[in-house]
Each structure stands twice: as structure tokens, then as C-alpha cells.
Image (tube, rainbow, N blue to C red):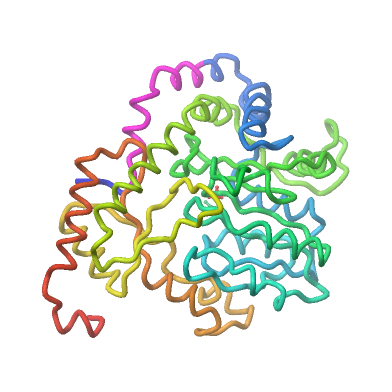
Amino acid sequence: MIPFLDLKAQYQTIKEKIDEAVSKVISDAQFILGEEVEAFEEEFARYCESRYSVGVNSGTSALHLALLAADVGAGDEVITVPFTFAATAAAICYTGARPVFVDIDPRSRLIDATKIEEAITPRTKALVPVHLYGQCADMTPIIEIARRHGLVVIEDAAQAHGAYYKERRAGSLGDLACFSFYPGKNLGAYGEGGAVVTSNAHYVKRIRALRDHGQSRKYLHEAVGYNYRLEAVQGAVLRVKLRYLDEWNAARRAHASEYRRQLADTEVRLLEEMDYGRMVYHIFPVFTERRDQLQEHLKNSNTGTGIHYPIALHLQPAYTGLGYRAGDFPHSEQASAETLSLPMYAELSRDAIDEVACAVRDFFRRPRIFAEDQGG
Ligand SMILES: *Cc1c(COP(=O)(O)O)cnc(C)c1O
């Protein structure tokens, strides 16, 4: 069986260092925030080529606090894409603001910057481009539009630790950037985790207070805050893993080029790698109208796959209140109907890639069954 993701394999490569770091936290009995989290925050900010990072308990919390720091609240609108993980839109709703969707570019599957301006109203407060699959959105036009309209840019970089846009890293591109350390992300904790990255000291002060009950110092509550603190164990694990991130991302890129080489002459469509940056392949997606059948075929060939994501957000039951309908965002709808994620992690072996690619090629060589073409 070739799993979609193999976190056990990664642990085996760093077991000693992780075990040592975790047991130090336990023997120090400093479980929440503290030295390990502060050290990680400094190291991660430096890694992102930014000034500050604030560790929080999830990527979703990072988005929520970044939006609050940018003064987004009831009555405001925030522009993002419907082809993303639900947390991007949920965090906007937590603030009382309304998510306004803009379709994706069918090549990059990222926000289509040429469609942003027509979605801006006097209520628009922020833009949240999502660096989906580990590829940065086209930030130059996005930032230019934001400056012209006085909007804050918040990167959803939950899938893009270490990705580059031109000469700069994800996390250093917008006014604020949000990362997730969910275990399966390119930099994953051993539990929940996230961070807001920014070079703005004013934002940092607000986010540090809001993640810890709105306290500016102990028992002085300047605002109604949250318990969004990062645990020390996660800080310690993330510090160990951060040292390997570039190496792991390079391995992911090498696996991706091998997949590309072996799948180049098949019917399956691959994601376009934009020449403005360097993506980190959180996901290796392929696209086909026969996605469900290909997934079934791979399952029968002992290959685990995922779908990121099967229903565009404007068609999710939770977001029907926004008033969108099927057909409003055709590229997002098509991507969600056609995308399939192949196994992708640094420890993936060349044999496994050969096997997966062979199974994909085999699927497209089979004669089509009539019922299958009818969607059966
Ligand atoms: C994972 C993810 C999030 C949410 O992060 P959590 O740590 O799971 O809360 C937000 N946006 C995107 C694009 C993600 O992939």
C-alpha cells in the first residue's frame, strides 16, 4: 500500500531529536508558550524572511487573529477564493465580516487577480489570497490593487511554508500571513498549531494579546481575547522540524518533477507551475473529468489519494446564506470536480512514484466503459 501521506516514516528519520526535545519540555514543565515557543517564533520569522511571527493553536486561529488585527469586523467584506479549505472563509465569518468570492485562474488554480477589482465595494477591508497546493498567488498585482484601494493583504500560506514568489518567501509578501502546522502540512506539529507572520509591530502586539485572553500583561484584559496559545511541545517539535524543511521541500519538488516526467504524455492534466516563483508541493494534484473513476482505480492499485477540495465553498451548505449559485465561479467548480491529489511527502520512494505513475497511465490506457462516461 502506498499511503497518501506517511507521517510515521518522517518521524523515524528524526526520532532521536524529537524525543529529546519533547522530553525536555515535559521535564521543564513549561507547557504553554514560554521559551520553546518564543525561540520557534524567532526562527520561523527569520525563515519566512519577515520580522515577527506569533505562534497560535491552529492555522484557523492565525487567520482569525490576522483579520482582527487588521480591524476586520461586522459589516466589512473580505475577498478570497471559493476553491480553498473551508477555514479561509470560516475565519472571515468569525469576525462578523462577509466573505466575497473571486474565481480562480484556470492555469494556476489560484485567485485571478484580474477579477479582484470588480468585487471591491466600499465595504471591502481585506484581500486573502490563498497559496494553494504550495504555490504563491500572483502577489504583485494583488498588492498593487490593495494599495490603490487601501486594503490589507493577508496571505493564507497554510500550504506554502518555504514557497517563493519572485525573490521572496511566502509569509513576507502581504501585510500579514497565516500558516498552519496541522500535522500533514509541509511543516507539521505533533498536534494543532499555527502562526501569524508580519513585519508590523503594531499587528504583533494586538495578536499576542488576543491569543492570550486579550491580556497586555497578566490579568490586565485590554480586549475580549481568546485562548489561542501554542503549546510548548509543538514549539519544540517545530524547532526540530524547521531545520529540515528546505531539504524536505526540495525532495517534494524532485518527486513532483518525476511525476511530471512520467505523466507528461498521458491524458491527465497537471498543475501549471507559474514561472514567477518556486512552489513547495504541499499537494501534487492532477485533473481529469474522470476523477472519481481514477481515484477508484488507484485505490484498487493500492494507492492512497485525496481530494483538495471536492466542493467549492460557495456551494457548501454552510455558505448558502451568501447567496451564490452553481455556475457563479466556473473555474473553481471545475477544479473541485476534477482534482485528485497523488501521494506526496519527502520520504516517498522512487519505486512508489513509479508505481503510482504506472497505475495512472494504466487507467488512461483502459478502454472507456460506456456507463463510466455517463458519470456512472
Ligand atoms: C490547513 C489550512 C487552513 C487551516 O489550518 P488549521 O491548522 O487546520 O486550522 C487554512 N487554510 C488552508 C488553505 C489550509 O490548507
Residue positioned 19% across, 63% down in the render: 297
Residue reaching furthest to the left: 367
Magenta region, main secondary structure: helix
The C terminus sits in image quarter: bottom left
Q: Is residue 69 above or below residue 371?
A: above
Of 358 and 144, nearer the camera is: 144
Residue positioned 68% across, 28% down in the render: 42
Magenta residues, start to end? 5-23
**Residue 9 is a magenta residue:** yes
Residue 133 falls left or right of residue 208: left
Asked which quadrant contains residue 88, the reply is bottom right
Residue reaching furthest to the front: 275
How far from the left and from the top, in percent, is residue 55? 65, 37
How far from the left and from the top, in percent, is residue 153? 72, 57
Of 109 and 336, nearer the camera is: 109
Residue positioned 35% across, 57% down in the render: 341
Asked which quadrant contains residue 286, the reply is bottom left
Residue 57 falls left or right of residue 198: left
How far from the left and from the top, in percent, is residue 125? 79, 65
How far from the left and from the top, in percent, is residue 296? 22, 64
How many numbered marks are there? 0
Residue 358 falls left or right of residue 151: left
Residue positioned 55% across, 25% down in the render: 236
**Residue 100 is a magenta residue:** no
